[in-house]
Image (cartoon, helix red, strand yellow):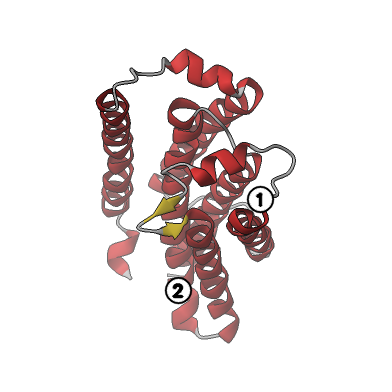
Amino acid sequence: MDVLWKRKSLVWAVVGLGALMPALLGWQWMRFEAAVWQAGVGGVPITERLTMDPVGNTLAIIALVSMVCVVVLTVYRLNKEATIPVSGWWAIPLLAVVGLGIMLYLASIPETMICYPSGACQVIQQSEYGEILNVPVGILGALGYLSILATWSASLIGSSRLLQIVPWALLALTLLGVLFSLYFTFLEPFVIGATCPWCLTSAILMTILFWLSAETVQSLRLEKAIYG
């Protein structure tokens, strides 16, 4: 585990994963525009997409900027020497259960065709972005939250080795989740033109989980700094 305590290694790992996000967004944007123009119907201006769901898309943009700020601040905090963390260990499973419920609800929409409080999530579910490799996004999200719950639960076993590994595993899982959430939150206002409130809620939950996971890593680092 000593390698994990090296700040440069952590920073480069996070920066490397973060660098994938703008590349993926840029590629997705170009792919979408190319498909639209190839269909012979012309591109839909971004301003028009934003006005398709003005309230939802505005909230999505605000959430997107806020999420980026939280991620940047969290990475900055991790890059510093061990600092006093914010205690939130027991909030992690509670938030993950809420996120799991949201994802299962979204996964049920294609069958029930019921979406509250708006129908925007139906628009997203029926778009080409509603599935990844033929798997509904709701199912993938549910698997992500289940992985977080399972990893957190492993700490209850009481093994000292697991207690050293679990915080880092949670950090990796929530980082992957928050990158995916950033990607999808970007697609909603700028490409799809509709914002699902449940997807937005899940994105915010995942960002909080990432921050809390980073705080557990800080607790581990502080303990190591004090007791060696």
State which quadrant residue 34 falls in: top left
In the rendered image, the residue lying farthest to the front is: 40
* 1 or 2: mark nearer the eye: 1
Residue 204 locus on image (x, y percent): 60, 43
Instruction: State whether residue 29 is above or below residue 77.
Output: above
**In the visual, does 150 lie left or right of 45?**
right
Q: Residues within 10 Å of mark 2 (few under 14, many from 20)?
A: some
State which quadrant residue 91 falls in: bottom right
49 or 88: nearer the viewer = 49
Residue 124 locus on image (x, y percent): 53, 41
User: Residue placed at 26% from the left, 54% from the top?
Assistant: 9
Question: Looking at numbered disc 2 in the image, what kind of residue is underneath it?
Answer: Gln
**Which element carries disc 2, helix, strand or loop?**
helix
Q: Residues within 10 Å of mark 1 (few under 14, many from 20)?
A: few
The residue under label 1 is 113
Residue 220 locus on image (x, y percent): 49, 64
User: Residue placed at 35% from the left, 58% from the top?
Assistant: 133
Residue 100 locus on image (x, y percent): 62, 62
24 or 211: nearer the viewer = 24
Question: Looking at numbered disc 1 in the image, what kind of residue is underneath it?
Answer: Met
Measured Cα–Cα span from mark 1 to mark 2: 44 Å
Q: Earlier in the sequence, mark 1 or mark 2?
A: 1
**In the visual, does 228 lie left or right of 37?**
right
The residue under label 2 is 164
